[in-house]
Image: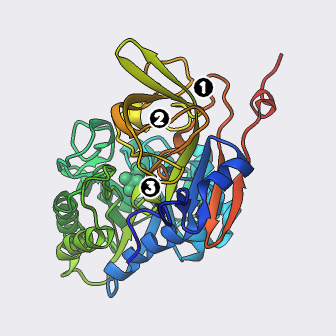
Amino acid sequence: MFPVRPFAHPDKKSPLACGEVALDALAKKFGTPLYVYSADHIRYRSGLFTEAFAGQPHLVCYAVKANSALAILKLLAAEGAGFDIVSGGELERVLAVDKAAAARVVFSGVGKTAPEIDLALRSGILLFNVESEGELELLAERAAKLRKRARIALRVNPDVFAETHPYISTGLREHKFGIDIKRARTVYKRAAQQKWIAPAGISVHIGSQIRSAEPFGAATDRVAKLLLQLRKDGLPIQFLDAGGGLGIEYHAAQAFNPEEKVRQYAAALRDAVSRIEGLTLLLEPGRFLVAQAGALVTRVLFVKKNGEKTFVITDAGMNDLIRPTLYQAHHEIVPVTATKSRRKLVADVVGPVCETGDFFARDRELDAVKPGDLVAILDAGAYGMSLASNYNTRGRAAEVLVEGKRARLIRRRETVADLLATEVL
Ligand SMILES: *Cc1c(COP(=O)(O)O)cnc(C)c1O
């Protein structure tokens, strides 16, 4: 069995490593802040889905927004994965990596524009996940104009509650996502009347970082019932897109077994669809595949005391990893140097950005660190770099992909010249 994370100390005298590659050497070579990912771990996570869904026709469509690095898309495409995209830009990324993978792309998102729709139609994507009646109208118009048939699924809102952070819960009627499940049959009938629209699927996505399998089962059950109804209405619905959202444990103290997680998730979904013939399940995991495969390596600049409080100031900031401040997310923070017995320290770990919200941890007990030390912020492979910004005119971090003994730069550090290049004086 693989460990939950690919980051560990090979022994007490050695620095933290990603697989076989020491992180201090990577920091020296590529600088900090630095995102480091394990290719082997991403392949392992993707394989868990293949195993758990064996015997059930399915396609894993990796959610590109979790981490859209081309090298990661390429390795997943080579595993046979499809892609869940939410913009034309993400489609361009998939096309840049593997043109043939367009046939395995599903296009989600509440605000698709005509140019994005046109690109997707011309690329021959697998499925449009339509999120409103207005979008359906626009898609029908563009498809007719381009004389390209669009396979569609309606993304229905199942009104299922899932325990997660309110910003990443999407499956309730009060959220902007999807079409009310009660209205869906009417909208499907209207879609079926459009010459260039082919209703082919039904889709649902209830949110992100959901750790229990139960709400996935409940939502899939609801859409499975609708699917059977639609078939009775005469629509050849083949795809059930169960969305993404399978969560991980960010706290090291919390027991977590990825293999068991995927098995429970698969069991809940298979339970809901087992009686339906001729069905292909689409799965859209993002975080689960890449979060724990990645870490953000950063150097301590200063350790500062303000009265009672201690601040560990790192060269990474909220522009590099916004999850703690955006979602009150927890990330384990560990020193990169060897694990000799260490003093402890209680501190806020903060970045250099001019915002009080620029923190990675608050009042956290850490192994004592001093200026110049390297620390790794764990489980940063998903929604880390993909949410990074240039706030404070900070170039985005470099990214490294580790495969066995090899590490290679997959994105160079952004320079200030890169940032100024688009501006006009
Ligand atoms: C964000 C998103 C996903 C991926 O969610 P994860 O929590 O990363 O698995 C899948 N499908 C849709 C439609 C999404 O918006």
Q: Distance between the residues labelled 1 and 2?
A: 11 Å
Residue 203 shows which numbered tag? none
Quarter of the image that includes the C terminus: top right
Q: In the rendered view, does 410 fall on the left or right side of 161?
A: right
SS class of the residue under badge 2? loop
Q: Is residue 38 shown above or below 136? A: below
164 or 27, which is in the foreground?
27
Quarter of the image that includes the N terminus: bottom left
Q: Mark 2 points at which residue?
A: 322
The answer to whether marks 1 and 2 mark residues whose Cβ atoms lie closer than 8 Å is no
Looking at the rendering, which quadrant does residue 121 occupy? bottom right
Instruction: Please report whichever mark, 3 or 1, sits nearer to the chain's N-terminal start.
Output: 3
Type of the residue with mark 2:
Ile
Q: In the rendered view, does 1 fall on the left or right side of 422?
A: left
Q: How far apart are marks 3 and 2 (CA)?
A: 14 Å
Q: Mark 1 points at which residue?
A: 391
Categorize mark 1 by other alpha carbons within 10 Å: few (<14), some (14-19), many (20+). some
296 or 425, which is in the foreground?
296
Q: Distance between the residues labelled 3 and 1?
A: 23 Å
Q: In the rendered view, does 352 fall on the left or right side of 70?
A: left
SS class of the residue under badge 3? helix
Looking at the rendering, which quadrant does residue 232 occupy? bottom left
9 or 42, which is in the foreground?
9
Name the residue: 20% across, 49% down: 162
Indicate if the residue with disc 3 has its beta carbon within 8 Å of ligand 1: yes
The answer to whether marks 3 and 2 mark residues whose Cβ atoms lie closer than 8 Å is no
Q: Is residue 220 shown above or below 388? A: below
Q: Is residue 283 shown above or below 249? A: below
Q: Is residue 278 shown above or below 328? A: below
Name the residue: 17% across, 47% down: 161
Q: Estimate the x, y position of residue 379 in percent, counting from the top left.
A: 43, 52
